[in-house]
Amino acid sequence: MSMNELMDAARVNKAWPFQEAQRLLKRYPDGAKPDGSPILFETGYGPSGLPHIGTFQEVLRTTLVRRAFEAIIGAKPEDGKTRLVAFSDDMDGLRKVPENIPNAEVLRANLNKPLSRIPSPFSNEHESFAAHNNAMLREFLDRFGFDYEFIASSDMYNSGQFDEALKQVLRKNQDILDIMLPTLREERRQTYSPVLPISPTTGAVLQVPVDVVDAESGIIRFTNEDGNVIEQSALGGQSKLQWKVDWAMRWYALGVDYEMSGKDLTDSVTQSSKIVRALGSPPPTTFIYELFLDANGEKISKSKGNGFTIDEWLTYGTEESLGLYIFREPKSAKQLHAGIVPRAVDEYWQFRAALASQPLDKQLGNPAWHLLRANGGFEGAEAPGAGDTLPVTYGLLLNLVGVLGAEADRDAVWSYLANYVEDADPAKHPELDVLVNAALAYNRDFVAPTLKKRAPSENEAAALRELDEVLAGLDPAISAEEIQTEVYEIGKREEYGFESLRDWFRALYETLLGSEQGPRMGSFITLYGVENSRKLIAEALAKA
């Protein structure tokens, strides 16, 4: 496949990253800015807390759009046609002490100061609370191989790199007030100012009215906490901006072309877009995604503790499965909990297995194409790992671990995998080994506590007895597919009274495995072993 073929297909593909990239192409029909500088994608991070699954989803989705845009314009990541900036808003004042932070008294003693000017409560390794959290962000992004540039707000303010943009904010102070004041409650209007001075006596970020004395030199006037009227510069880190103004100023100063955000920031996008126009630049192309919900369909809240963390997902699943879940339907609210992980794992591998044999238009709509491309780049189906499959599904592993019960451990699972997998060695199947450990953890925390094998009914017991006889007479060389056919035939027999094969398989799952759903029985019997499977049948019949 040629680059031109890829470009042509990408320009019309309906997968959402291409749809977003096509919107960006309307902004720059030639695929580049008039001055030749790279197209700038941005993601934002508030370092009052540690990186979380929301941080991951925003950087991943932005990366997917970035790579889709490169495909459309015929660029490779190394060509430098695009940039991704991870921006930390660490000049924000600390409004409240986050939960689960050690030495919280350090933070309480520094409330309202910029996050970058508060000592770290974690250790002396970092010079500030924000520096610690910024380091965690970079470690977090590096862990997943993201290609990004890190920018801290404090560096931009303190070094004067934002000074020219701040002067423009001061010049347009009244225009910004005209945009923002109608959106505020009357009480808030009385103290609102686009510029937040930093107190020269306490170092706190002040929410007070501000007069612009001289926009060209950056001088402002305000009443300090001690009641004194102060004139000081707004430049060089002596002030920061209100959130919506700050976001717009950042777009203006950096020349941001694309940024996405959660539905909770819809109004911020609207007002910041108006403000950046007032400053003299067009707003970036923006994308609003829906937020995650918990298992009960409720909004995830830190205070409620009803979230599902990225570390939890990676305990029970894989990075790729999380990527798949985040890739799909970004404009739909989705539940985020442990119960969705196994299906996401198996669906990812189904997409990956299909990729190599698909025509180009189907490849570009395949989530695995986008996820494999995200942090390396490739042209079309030549992705590393395209077409790969796992010899055993995650669902099948969970069933195996479930029936092994208390004896289940990594070595035991691999010993059973030898019945099914050629060269059943963890070193030769590292991705499968990851799933073995994940399945053990998932079974321990979610499956084992709920497993309950019911007794078979009379007709189910009769069918199980025939299945046992069939298994007893099997040729040792029989394939999993042939065993599956034998199981099918038993379920079809009229004398057992199953209304459908689904009822027969549900009976197998509930009486032998203790779950409502299960694997292809031919695969399971091959994996678990014929004799061990017959023992399961004997145990079930003993309850009849």
Image (cartoon, grey):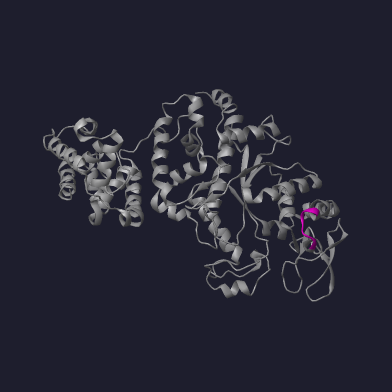
Whether residue 376 sits left or right of residue 498 in the image: it is right
Is residue 466 magenta-colored? no
The one of 360 and 449 positioned closer to us in this rendering: 449
Q: Quadrant of residue 34?
A: top right
Residue plotted at (29% across, 38% down): 503
Is residue 183 magenta-colored? yes
Whether residue 281 sits left or right of residue 130 in the image: it is right
- The percent position of residue 496, horizontal first and vertical second, equals 20, 35
- The percent position of residue 395, horizontal first and vertical second, equals 33, 43
The one of 494 and 156 positioned closer to us in this rendering: 494
Residue plotted at (22% across, 42% down): 418
Characterize the magenta stretch by its predominant secondary structure.
helix
Q: Residue furthest right?
A: 213
Q: Quadrant of residue 78?
A: top right
The one of 309 and 256 positioned closer to us in this rendering: 309
Q: Quadrant of residue 389?
A: top left
The one of 157 and 371 positioned closer to us in this rendering: 371
Asked if residue 140 shows in the view, the reply is yes
Highlighted range, magenta = 182-186
Residue 77 lies, with reference to residue 247, above or below; the image says above
Q: Residue furthest left?
A: 473
Task: Give the total number of marks visible in the rendering.
Answer: 0
Whether residue 229 sits left or right of residue 395 in the image: it is right
Residue plotted at (74% across, 51% down): 249
Asked if residue 520 shows in the view, the reply is no
Residue plotted at (25% across, 50% down): 453
Residue 292 lies, with reference to residue 102, above or below; the image says above
- The percent position of residue 3, horizontal first and vertical second, equals 55, 26
- The percent position of residue 217, horizontal first and vertical second, equals 85, 58
